[in-house]
Image: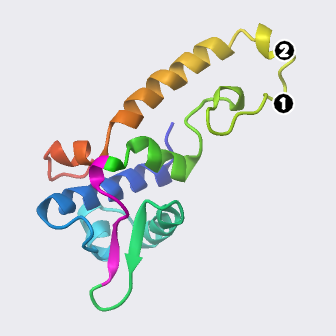
Amino acid sequence: MLTSKAKYALRAMTELATLAAERDWRQPVFISEIAERQNIPRRFLENILLELRKHGLVVSHRGKHGGYALAREPARISFADVIRAMDGPLAFTPCTSRTRYHPCDDCVSEAKCRLRLALMQAREAAAEILERTSLADAAATGADAPI
């Protein structure tokens, strides 16, 4: 299950992508505008945007016309990128992770594990969908309501 942090991050990023469709995607947006449009607590959003900046998904601009903007075009940022930045690997177990693989602590034999194959298939299916779904795709769905 996604954490609230990851869900809010996806909402904030799709909001930036939606606004980017109306103007230059590099143009910063005030935190207060994102928070209001997506009904996200401002303090929580500030922390999320700092984390997204640390992972290179957004850039911040200081000053009177400052705020946050996407670090690259919306079509080049996937849902998987955002979820990994907030929650870590997409895998259900460490032994099925592509990006942070390590054997499970309580596993006797990975080769004989009865869970691993199904969990790997589930991870692959979910990752395939999340990797191919971009912020531009989400913004193009059109609804003005929060996702």
Residue under the image location 70 percent in, 32 percent down: 94
Q: Which mark is residue 58?
A: none
Name the image quarter holding residue 107. top right
Name the image quarter holding residue 22. bottom left
Judge the density around disc 1: few (<14), some (14-19), many (≥20) Cα neighbours within 10 Å. Answer: few
Residue under the image location 34 percent in, 49 percent down: 76
Judge the density around disc 2: few (<14), some (14-19), many (≥20) Cα neighbours within 10 Å. Answer: few
Tell me where residue 120 appears, x and y as whole percent. Answer: 59, 20
Magenta segment includes 72: yes
Magenta segment includes 91: no
- The residue sitting at the right extreme is 108
Inspect the image, locate mark 1, and give the three-letter code of the amino acid beneath it: Asp
48 in relation to 145, above or below = below
State which mark lies toward you, 2 or 1. Answer: 2
127 in relation to 139, above or below = above
Inspect the image, locate mark 2, and give the three-letter code of the amino acid beneath it: Ser
Q: Is residue 6 left or right of residue 100?
A: left
Tell me where residue 87 appears, x and y as whole percent. Answer: 56, 47
SS at circle 1: loop
Badge 2 is on which residue?
109
27 in relation to 136, above or below = below
Q: Is residue 133 left or right of residue 118?
A: left
Tell me where residue 77 appears, x and y as whole percent. Answer: 36, 49
Residue under the image location 51 percent in, 36 percent down: 1
Q: Which mark is residue 105?
A: 1
147 in relation to 47, above or below = above
- The residue sitting at the bottom extreme is 64
SS at circle 2: loop
Residue under the image location 34 percent in, 59 percent down: 72
Q: State if disc 1 and disc 2 touch (CB < 8 Å).
A: no
Tell me where residue 108 appears, x and y as whole percent. Answer: 87, 17
- The magenta segment: 66-75
